[in-house]
């Protein structure tokens, strides 16, 4: 089983719909991150959390919200999806000086 | 803000060739540097992690070096194979390692 699991793997939704992307981890890491990846732009940080009571905005948080339901779970919501939110979304975890671990990503298409 | 640059953006080499991928960063006060591999449409797989106190790390045919003073890291791939074809990303973390900055990657194609 994957250490960092993202669901769904693929999602197509319409403009204006609310959707949630979920991330769960079995690594016991405190830190969790949400990134989006667009061609030519690399990975950009949306939100991050250092523990259940700590949520921080990244460089592109507008239009997104997150919830850290438990140490192992960190979900990303798009309140009202728009086409320029079409991207590949990644969840990642880290702890101390350990490597950053990524999930397999969610490919989101907003029509 | 930390800027991470990877040059070239794309590289094509014949099978068996040794090659070097480059990563440069603007703030030398890094906590660690990590190299990843990404296959098309897939997640990122960690290849090597170099702590700020280290100069290099090796794993199989891969060797990563770090020169903080010049703000550079290189990923050396020996005897390249078609299966090495992927995008290679480097990321640096600052402070206590809580925040990560990514390069835009080098797309590598190894021609059989």
Image (cartoon, coloured by chain):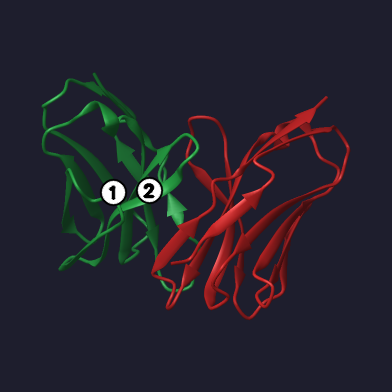
Chain colours: A green, B red
Which sits in the foreground, B7 or B73?
B7
Question: At which x and y percent is residue A73?
Answer: 23, 53
Secondary-structure class at tag 1: strand
Q: Is residue A92 left or right of residue B48?
A: left
Which subunit holds the residue at mark 2?
A
The tag on residue B18 is none
Question: At which x and y percent is residue A31?
Answer: 32, 64
Give the total number of marks visible in the rendering: 2
The numbered mark, 1 or 2, whose residue comes first in the sequence reads 2
Which subunit holds the residue at mark 1?
A
Secondary-structure class at tag 2: strand
Q: In the rendered structure, are the residues bearing label 1 and label 2 in contact, judged by CB atoms less than 8 Å apart? A: yes
Q: Is residue A102 left or right of residue B66?
A: left
Crowd rating for badge 1 (residues with CA inside 10 Å; few <14, some 14–19, many 20+): many
**Residue B17 falls in image quadrant:** top right
User: Can see residue A45?
Assistant: yes
Q: Is residue A110 above or below residue A51?
A: above
Residue depicted at x 34% and y 63%: A28
Mark 1 → mark 2, Cα distance in angstroms? 6 Å
Quadrant into which the N terminus of chain A falls: top left
Question: At which x and y percent is residue B60?
Answer: 76, 53
Crowd rating for badge 2 (residues with CA inside 10 Å; few <14, some 14–19, many 20+): many
Spot the residue most to the bottom: B53
- Which residue in the protein does label 2 denote? A4
Question: At which x and y percent is residue A89?
Answer: 35, 39
**Residue A32 falls in image quadrant:** bottom left
Quadrant into which the C terminus of chain A falls: top left
- Which residue in the protein does label 1 denote? A24
Which sits in the foreground, B36 or B107?
B107
Q: Is residue A95 left or right of residue B61?
A: left
User: Can see residue A98?
Assistant: no
Q: Is residue A98 above or below residue A101?
A: below
């Amino acid at each position: 089983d994957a250490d960092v699991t993202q669901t769904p793997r693929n999602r197509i939704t319409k403009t204006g719909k609310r959707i949630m992307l979920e991330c769960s981890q079995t690594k016991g890491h405190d830190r969790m991150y949400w990134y989006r990846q667009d061609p030519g732009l690399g990975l950009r940080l949306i939100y991050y959390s250092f523990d259940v009571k700590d949520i921080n905005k990244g460089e592109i948080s507008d239009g997104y919200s997150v919830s850290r339901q438990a140490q192992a779970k960190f979900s990303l919501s798009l309140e009202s999806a728009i086409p320029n939110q079409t991207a590949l979304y990644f969840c990642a975890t880290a702890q101390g000086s350990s490597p950053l671990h990524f999930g397999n990503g969610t490919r989101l298409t907003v029509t | 803000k930390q800027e991470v640059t990877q040059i070239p953006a794309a590289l094509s080499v014949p099978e068996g060739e040794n090659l070097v991928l480059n990563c440069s960063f603007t703030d030398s006060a890094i906590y660690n540097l990590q190299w990843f591999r990404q296959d098309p449409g897939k997640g990122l797989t960690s290849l090597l992690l170099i702590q700020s106190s280290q100069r290099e790390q090796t794993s199989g045919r891969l060797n990563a070096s770090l020169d903080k003073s010049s703000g550079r890291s290189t990923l050396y791939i020996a005897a390249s194979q078609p299966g090495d074809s992927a995008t290679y990303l480097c990321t640096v973390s600052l402070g206590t390692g809580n925040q990560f900055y990514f390069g835009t990657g080098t797309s590598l194609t190894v021609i059989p």
